[in-house]
Amino acid sequence: MTFKERFFRGEIPFDEIDRYTGHWNFSDETCTLAQYLGLNAEEEDVWISQSDEALEALLEKEKKAYASCPVKILFTDLDGTLLNDQKQISAANRDAIDRALHAGHKIVLATGRALSSTLPIASDLGLDRDGCYIIAFNGGQIYDCHTGRFLLDCTLPLEYVSRIFEEAARAGIHCQTYEDEFLLSPCEDEEMIYYIGSTNSPCKIVEDIPGSLLKEPNKVLLIDLHDHQRLVDFRRHMQPYFEGRMDSMFSSTFYLEIVPRGVSKGNALHYLSNYLNIPMENTVAAGDSENDLPMILEAHIGAVLSNGLPSVKEQADYVTEKDNNHDGFAEIIDKFILN
């Protein structure tokens, strides 16, 4: 637990910040001091540009505000969670989201998809108001739907991307990445057609994708629609190269996601909750697959839809009675956000 979290809970006085700072100075922590303390950008700026006293005053003000009006934040996966198997949002799920927002709570769409294919869903739900966010690329991007700006944007070095494409081509596995609003695919194959049909992503066919990229992408995605074991074997083969450079996860049996090291929905959940000064005990996460597990474990309440993977349900705080085709998502809102 960070200094700020313990301070907000009334467990420690402000003076304890000196002890935390000293511990960070003599530790092997790779995060910044502000991250270690749990300070967001505004708080860090006040501390640096003004004084300890100014920071204490700001934190005291924030502490009183959140004690008197606890705001909850719900992080939800899309496919298999908020969306049914036809990629639609039920009337009950729409109503639950609207009721949660009107009550002053915050909604975050947390997905492995690109921002470009998530924005239409957010727009359809009316999530362009204050308190609505998108976590895209499994935590690689955090986007404020109200202001239209990025809070976080993590990318993969181009040399890593080239190596992944080379190895995927050698293994005969479909490999794609993203640039701006476009999905980049090396050919119009079965996997590309399936992915576009599932996500409505705009696509470009580019033969030499690594050589054509003008900037670092947020992730690389490998797809095999018929043999999950091939993706498992590819990940095992590449693990020595991934180690210390990138992380990998399955978002479905078809999709193997490759993201920058340290990127996950769980880390994005923690980053955004801290940015918004929402205590971890007011966080709820909903998902169904392996890539959702980090946020399910990080949240105070990690809920899994009844259609979720058995290995994910085993580690959840709550498993819904209903599945994603029968308003299981609304069940989570009614039980943990509005209750």
Image (spheres, helix red, strand yellow):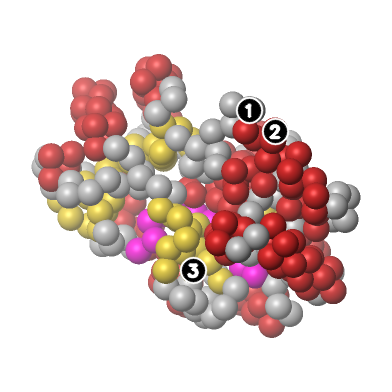
Assess disc 2: are there few (<14), some (14-19) or many (≥20) residues with their C-alpha within 10 Å of its C-alpha: few
Q: Which of marks 3 and 1 is nearer the N terminus?
A: 1
Residue 259 horizontal/vertical position (percent): 41, 39
Residue identified by numbered label 1: 27
Q: Which of marks 2 and 3 is nearer the N terminus?
A: 2
Residue 30 lies in what quarter of the image? top right
Instruction: Give me the disc on residue 23.
Output: 2
Q: In which quarter of the image is residue 177?
A: top left
In this view of the protein, which residue sits in the foreground, 61 or 271? 61
Give neighbour class at mark 3: few <14, some 14-19, many 20+ (Cα, 10 Å).
Answer: many
Q: Which amino acid does label 3 sit on?
A: Asp
- 223 or 265: nearer the viewer: 265
Residue 285 x %, y %: 67, 54
| Stretch in magenta | 106-116
Place of residue 122 in the rendered image (x, y in percent of width and height, measured from the top left): 48, 72
112 drawn magenta: yes
The image quadrant of residue 282 is: bottom right
Q: Name the residue under label 3.
A: 144
For residue 75, say whether it is visible. Answer: no
Is label 2 in contact with label 1 (beta carbons under 8 Å)? yes
- The amino acid pointed to by label 1 is Ser
Along the line of sight, the residue nearer the viewer: 5 or 85: 5
Is the residue 179 above or below the residue 127 in the image? above
Q: Distance between the residues labelled 3 and 1?
A: 33 Å
Q: Is residue 76 above or below residue 292?
A: below
Which of the two residues, 265 or 87, is positioned nearer the viewer here? 265
- Amino acid type assigned to the residue bearing label 2 in the image: His
Left or right position of 146 against 294: left
Comparing labels 2 and 3, the label whose residue is closer to the camera: 2
Residue at horizontal 59%, vertical 31%?
A: 29
* Secondary structure at numbered mark 2: helix
